[in-house]
Amino acid sequence: MTALGKVVRTTAFKLSVIYIGVFSAFAVIFVAYISYSANTLLNEQLRATIAAEIRGLAEQGRIGGIAAVFQVIEERSNQPGASLYLITDVSGRILTGNISQVPADLFQRPGMGPITVSYERNLGEGSRHVAMVQVLRLPGGFWMLVGRDIGEREEFREIIGRALVWAAALMIALALLSWMFVSRRVLKRIDSVAATSRRIVAGDLSDRLEVTGTGDEFDRLADSLNAMLDRIEHLLYSLKDVSDNIAHDLKTPLTRLRNRVESTLAGPTDTAVYRGALESTIEESDRLIQTFNALLMIARIEAGSQDGIMTEVDASAIVRDVGELYEPVAEESGARLEVSTPTPVVLKANRELLGQAVANLIDNALKYARPSDDRPLKVVVSTARVGGELILQVADNGAGIPEADRDRVVQRFVRLEKSRSLSGSGLGLSLVAAVATLHDGTTTLGDNKPGLVVTIRLPITIEQNASKPSKTNTVSAQPR
């Protein structure tokens, strides 16, 4: 009973019952209409035939009198497939015809239209038949009956009735077979989805819904859900990585803060010492706040938040502005910063985020790109339009990044500098990659031979209407 109840509660079963009811009702109505129409047509044909017989006999009577009518009926009665004829006298005695018995009160209702009565033929078979007859009174007190057997019509009705029963039975059988096939297939897919969902809930985030390749609605639903599961898995693992990285990378500065405060409190009471400890604590706190701000910005960008609307901006102008901002930093570090923006490149972008990405790349190059010999550091920032894309590059002549580490370095908190002697959180390139993804672009790291070149490709969806002269800013400084 439990299994039966489960089957009855399924949508496939309910739909099958509805379909059986609807199509059965349609079949009954259709067959009934055909039966009614055929019966009406046959009745009209019978009445027309009887009327034609009567007109023919009346014509014979006008020509040859009652004797001619008797003779014609006698001849026609013996023909195969003949109509039904009967002539009686006033007392009801049969004079001629091919009928041996009719209802006794039949001749008491003359002048009526054709009626249906039972009769027996005079062939000695003893079986009763049904006929549509017309009774007329002839001159001299004679009664005449003309009719047609309607046994064929009744047989037709029986055939229609049997066909209706067989059609209903066949329809129900086919509906049950269709239900078994559909429900088995549908329930199998639904059970597969349910089983996969249970495994995912149990912790197997890599499991996916089955895609059979038929391209039906279940495959389309499975593709959509699998894409959603891929995104959820990526976000969960990213969250786990962020949590692990935060616990690992922020534990050290927090411990350093605590130890500094503890050692200061344990030492002699000195205002200058306390002040220095507080200043160091504030600097360390600022770096922690910057790290958290970078994490929040990356999270908002990856979640699709733009932190501002997309507007038409000139990427070349943004690069020049950021380059001017870093000119003093390049001079102080003894580096050479070149900004090459030959022509304006206008695209729809978020000005603040695009500027932040360029600033991160320049800052990383000035901090970590140390040449292997005595040559000064050179950082080149350039923009160009290639086809329908903005190509923004930041290249340096430093030691570069090994090819095996280029994919890993854009992840959060990844720092290739083992000593961690330089300030930084390992989030700069992660933010750059997130900004490029937000703008439907890509970020690639390549070999500048020597050094590293970071290339950002962003699609341009608007036409360029203006062209400005080439502009290159170069800031050079000798090492101090």
Image (cartoon, grey):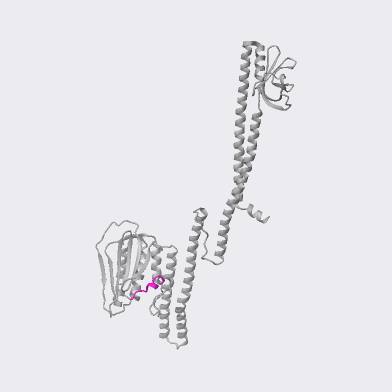
- Residues drawn in magenta: 399-408
Number of dots carrying numbers:
0
Give the answer, above or below, for where 77 lies relative to 186: above
> Any magenta on residue 402?
yes
Q: Report the quarter where the N terminus lies.
A: bottom right
Question: Is 303 positioned to the left or the right of 13 in the image?
Answer: left
Query: Is residue 446 in sight in this rendering?
Result: yes
Instruction: Choose between 54 and 242: the one closer to the eye.
Output: 54
Quarter of the image with the C terminus is bottom left
**Where is residue 21 shown, x and y percent of the image?**
62, 44
Residue 33 image-quadrant placement: top right
Seen at 45% across and 79% down, the residue is 252
Vertical placement of residue 314 versus 147, above or below? below
Q: Residue 19 in the image: x percent, y percent? A: 59, 45
The rendered magenta stretch, by its main secondary structure, is classed as loop
Question: As rendered, which of 138 and 36 lies closer to the eye?
Answer: 138
326 or 192: which is nearer to us? 192
In the picture, residue 430 is in which quadrant? Answer: bottom left
Where residue 139 sits, quadrant-wise, is top right
Residue 150 in the image: state x and y as whole percent: 66, 27
In this view, the residue farthest toward the bottom is 268
Residue 356 visible in rendering: no
- Residue 67, given in percent of the width and then of the height, sits at 67, 12
Q: Residue at x 51, y 56 (%)?
A: 219
Indicate yes or no whether the magenta region holds residue 275.
no
Q: Who's the residue at 61% across and 19% down the image?
A: 52
